[in-house]
Image (cartoon, rainbow, N blue to C red):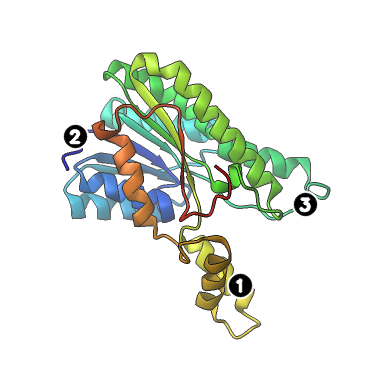
Amino acid sequence: MELGLRGKVAVVTGGSVGIGLAVAEGLAAEGVDVVIAARGEARVNGEAARIAETHRVRALGVACDVATRAGTDHLIAEVAKAFGGADILINNAGAGSNETVMAAPDEKWQAYWDLHVMAAVRLARGLAPLMKKRGGGVILHTASICAAQPLWYEPIYNTTKAALMMFSKTLSTELIGDNIRVNCVNPGLILTPDWIKTAKQLTADKGGDWQAYLDSVANEYAPIKRFASPEELANFYVFLCSERASYSVGSSYFVDGGMLKTV
């Protein structure tokens, strides 16, 4: 299927590992030039160089913390300098949490708000005007199934991802007149390095069978009985970025192997 993406420019935050890296690679495979942003300079530059060599596209790594105003300003400036703007923005940077509402301090709430919500707000404000000048574009937000079906041990993650989903909806209404389509993706169980790291930590004193732990999680929560690979999820992002998804506006898509229990 021709997706009409060749020659576009995409910005992907949280782009050096996991879902973000898989999305960047999936777009690059379609001929999209990519800017990947992450905090670790060596890793983000290394992955950008690998993507450029593998897919014969232009790829730029930008080391920045998008949870800060300085970080988003730096990313926007680098995108403008290197490409004159972008056609696609993937607001993907994020992290899980572990706390109780009663015990979590204000500072932790603020840190996750800045990472999951304000990063998306600031990047939209900075890049959407450049998209408009290019004739339009696509903005996708990585929220989570937890935005609608929360897990008890991460109330801050649940809350801020729900806010991101609502931001995506309201932004879509504001920008569609500029031919900028905004949607949200709510993944379920995706086998990212963070999941593997957590599984290894939780099983370290119980024999170290981290794969069995992940299998038990999938069996409990997902009717499909397995995790998705980041690449499997990335295929959906690539489609939503393409002209084949031209009527998809303001929606939240659950890609969760049947994990969501509501209709």
Residues tagged 3 and 1 counted as in contact (Cβ below 8 A): no
Choose between 48 and 251: the one closer to the eye.
Answer: 251
- Name the residue tied to disc 1: 201
Give the residue at the far top of this rendering.
177
Q: How many marks?
A: 3
210 with respect to 137 (left or right): right
**Label 3 crowd (10 A; few <14 / some 14-19 / many >=20):** few
Q: Amino acid at mark 2?
A: Gly
Choose between 61 and 126: the one closer to the eye.
Answer: 126
Q: Name the disc covering residue 100, or none.
A: 3
- Name the residue tied to disc 2: 4
Image spot of residue 100 (x, y percent): 77, 52
Image spot of residue 10 (x, y percent): 31, 36
Q: Residue at x 47, y 52 (%)?
A: 256
Disc 2, SS: loop
Q: Residue at x 54, y 34 (%)?
A: 165
**Residue 218 in the image: above or below residue 94:** below
Quarter the N terminus occupies: top left
Q: Amino acid at mark 3?
A: Thr
Q: Residue at x 49, y 23 (%)?
A: 171
**Considering only order in the chain, which callout, 1 or 2, is on the residue closer to the N terminus?**
2
**Considering only order in the chain, which callout, 1 or 3, is on the residue closer to the N terminus?**
3
